[in-house]
Amino acid sequence: MQLSPLDIRKQTFKRTLRGVDPEEVRMFLELVASEFEKVVQENAMMAEKISYQDERLDEYRDLEKSLRNSLVTAERIASESREASDREAQRIIQDAHSRAERILEDSRERLQRLVQEIEGLANKKETYVRRFKAMLEGQLTVLSDHEEQFGEIDSIADDAHEALSRSSSRDKEYARVSAPRAPVSDHRSGTTTAPRRVAAAVSRANSVAVETESEDWMGTRDREELPFDERNTYRSASAADSAGGDPEGFFEVQERREGFFQVDASEELDEYEPRRAD
């Protein structure tokens, strides 16, 4: 049974002969009721505080739960972010290694091609130098072989010039002489000997030119290996490239070899025509 301070105050007892003092009992009951009232008030206050604390505790529990969930979510997000970052970093590193390997491989291939091109150009240069040396040596050999014949042509030309001079002098002398006892035989000999000797000089000069042209002046007629074409014209870079020769065009000299080491004896005769006219 629950008692309140009011119940304590209104409590009554039976009267007996040898009972207690009613006033003292009343005072004691009043004191007990007062103390009990305080206890009830304190209990109510404590209950209210407990209720408030319970509410706050529930709030804190909810907050703790939310924080815990947030922490779990943050940890999960951080873990996923770390994994994604690690995967991305690994991919970037692999791509960088792949690009570096490709760049190094391309550089090695380009370097190898350049080395091969340089070696090819060096070989072509040596080949061209060797062939041109052989050509010059062949031309010097031809010149040395025909130097004697060229000297003979000069001697014949001098003789022809001298014969023409003598013929001209005799023609003038014959024109001045009116007597029939002039040396006709000498005149005929003078006039017929000069053309004959000139014709012999021309014939011999032509034979020298033909021999010079027909000789193998380089020791070979392999036109595919020579740096000039069939017209004795030095090949250009495009012509050499189309013929499978030098793509860089080392020797693009467009000079003709025609008449370089050869002598046309007919020019010797043309040189003396004005003198004969005199």
Image (cartoon, helix red, strand yellow):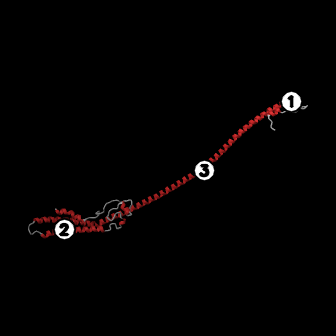
On-image quarter of the C terminus: bottom left
Pointer 1 residue? 22
Pointer 2 residue? 195
Q: CA distance from mark 2 to mark 1?
A: 197 Å
**Spot occupied by residue 15 in the image (x, y as percentages of width and height):** 89, 32
Horizontal relation, residue 244 to residue 273: left or right: right
For this orientation, the residue located farthest to the right is 17
- Amino acid, disc 2: Pro
Horizontal relation, residue 206 to residue 117: left or right: left
Question: In this rendering, is residue 119 above or below 214?
Answer: above
Pointer 3 residue? 80
- Amino acid, disc 3: Glu
Q: Disc 3 on helix, strand or loop?
A: helix
**Spot occupied by residue 106 in the image (x, y as percentages of width and height):** 48, 57
Pointers 1 and 3 in contact (C-beta within 8 Å)? no
Horizontal relation, residue 261 to residue 168: left or right: right
